[in-house]
Image (cartoon, grey):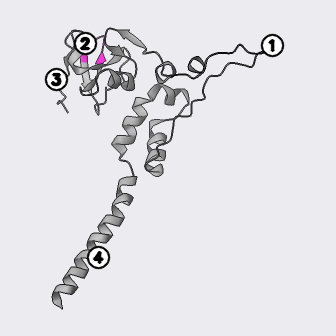
Amino acid sequence: MKKNIMLTVSLAITGIMVLSAPAFAQQKTVKACTEEWRANKAANQAAKITEKDYVAKCRAAGMAAPAPAVKPVTAPPAASTAPAPKTSPAAAAPTAKSMAPAPSTTGANQFTTEAQTKARCPSDTIVWVNMSSKIYHFAGHKDYGNTKNGVYMCEKDTAGAGARAAKNEKHP
């Protein structure tokens, strides 16, 4: 009888833990939301979305983070009444590669967004290189993404650019 009670209690606790796990997994951390905002920093700033507001909305939304409020650029409708030229389905449907913005670089292996850099080196650490001082900063540091003359780079490419790590920062 005592074993049945213990088994029932342990099964009930396990059931509660399993059912409540998705509730804990739904809310993102401040760090995750901040990283998302920084990955889309240019678009967010253009849409006048502050990092603080974005993080608050991201955390409140849980798994579905708010998308930056950027309207797609579309061409105005043609003024003529002539039928549009027919194109093949392959030419009409944009591919993922053609939809992605062209990498905006400032030099070899230098990028203006974290997302572009992450696509270049998915397994390497992304750093912010201050091109004036040739010193790079890691994510989470106050200067990461905030110096006037800087670019995102893969850490392995920084030596070729003549950059070194900031002395007051530790490698993540």
* Range covered by the magenta-colored residues: 129-135
Q: Pointer 3: residues within 10 angstroms few (<14), some, or many (20+)?
A: few
Q: Is residue 32 left or right of residue 48?
A: left
Does the magenta run of residues contain 134? yes
Q: Which residue is mark 4?
A: 12
Q: Nearer the viewer, mark 4 or mark 2?
A: 4
N-term mark: 2 or 1: 1
Residue 125 against residue 148 in the figure, above or below: below
Q: Quadrant of the C terminus?
A: top left
Residue type, numbered disc 1: Ala
Task: Choose between 38 and 157: the one closer to the eye.
Answer: 157
Q: Which mark is residue 167?
A: 3
Q: Is residue 7 left or right of residue 76?
A: left
N-term mark: 1 or 4: 4
Tell me where residue 116 appears, x and y as whole percent. 38, 22
Q: Which residue is mark 2?
A: 134
Q: Pointer 4: residues within 10 angstroms few (<14), some, or many (20+)?
A: few
N-term mark: 4 or 3: 4
Does the magenta run of residues contain 82? no
Q: Are marks 4 and 2 in contact (CB under 8 Å)?
A: no
Tell me where residue 124 appears, x and y as whole percent. 23, 26
Q: Which residue is mark 1?
A: 82
Q: Quadrant of the N terminus?
A: bottom left
